[in-house]
Image (cartoon, helix red, strand yellow):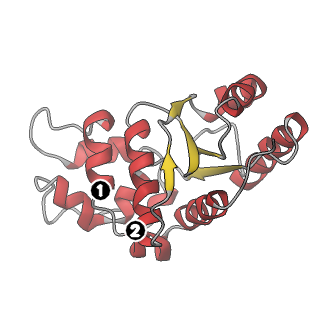
Amino acid sequence: MRRLLPIVEGHGDDKAVPLLLRRIFESHGIYDVSILPARRYGEYPIVTRKFDNLFQAAVLVKAPILWVMDFDSKDYICPVQEAHHLSTRAAALHPGWPIKFAFLVKEYETLFLIDEAATRQVFPDIPAKMPFPQNPEKIRGAKEWLSKARPSPGSTYKPTVDQAKITAHLNLDLLRMRSRDFAHLERAILELANSVVPS
């Protein structure tokens, strides 16, 4: 069976990202790719400093790699440039190794603000009159927005509890239309599914 190693940023991502990848594969009728347990390697500023060692550890799994991170740091401007930078470093270390980088602007939870119906299904306490952001990818702090939108005391958004739940309800067709980051992630995993690691 084909395999894919997801590398993610933090707690919550390690359950939500593999679930999202499986849903994408299933939507394309692909059922023979094994999603390996996700590795948490931290946010982009940490990754870019420690990339060589992190990548060397990841290739020991002998599987194509999808690296998913938020892109919400004020110190970096262009996700395309940063992805190219990491790809160049990876190629220098292991030429031909199948690896793709998927940055989500500004963060994974931005997908939840794009898909209002899925989010309301999991969080029915969000008031019906509460408008969702018109341009979710322009705002920083999607997690905080979700917490503030819930009026019940103590009903904050918790990635380790809520991220996979909402991911299970996401409308993939809607995300394909409204999120270039999601479309890029989807193209990346479909390409990786057909790649072979160097012997």
Question: Of tags 2 and 1, which is closer to the observer?
Answer: 1
Q: Does residue 70 show up? A: no
Task: Give the amino acid at mark 2.
Answer: Gln
Question: For residue 134, which numbered disc appears in the image?
Answer: 2
Q: Does residue 162 show up? A: yes
Answer few, some or many: residues within 10 Å of disc 2's Cα (few below 14, many 20 plus, some between 14 and 19): few
Question: For residue 125, which numbered disc appears in the image?
Answer: none
Residue 36 relative to residue 71: left or right = left
Dividing the picture into quadrants, the one containing residue 14 is top left
Lower position in the chain sequence, tag 2 or tag 1: 2
Q: Is residue 12 above or below residue 23?
A: above
Residue drawn at the location 64% of the way across and 32% of the way down: 61
Q: In this view, does 77 lie above or below 180?
A: above
- Give the Cα distance between marks 2 and 1: 23 Å
Q: In this view, does 64 lie above or below 154?
A: below
Give the percent coordinates (x, y) of residue 198.
Answer: 81, 44
Residue drawn at the location 33% of the way across and 54% of the way down: 167
Where does label 1 land, which residue? Answer: 168
Task: Give the amino acid at mark 1.
Answer: Ala
Q: Is residue 157 above or below residue 111?
A: above
Give the percent coordinates (x, y) of residue 139.
Answer: 47, 53
Residue 155 relative to residue 67: left or right = left
Give the percent coordinates (x, y) of residue 18.
Answer: 44, 47
Question: Is label 2 in contact with label 1 (beta carbons under 8 Å)?
Answer: no
Answer few, some or many: residues within 10 Å of disc 1's Cα (few below 14, many 20 plus, some between 14 and 19): some
Residue 16 relative to residue 57: left or right = left
**Element on which disc 2 rests:** loop
The C terminus is located in which quarter?
Answer: top right
Give the percent coordinates (x, y) of residue 38.
Answer: 49, 36
Q: Which of 186 and 72 is in front in this view?
A: 186
**Element on which disc 1 rests:** loop
Q: Which of 103 and 197 is in front in this view?
A: 197
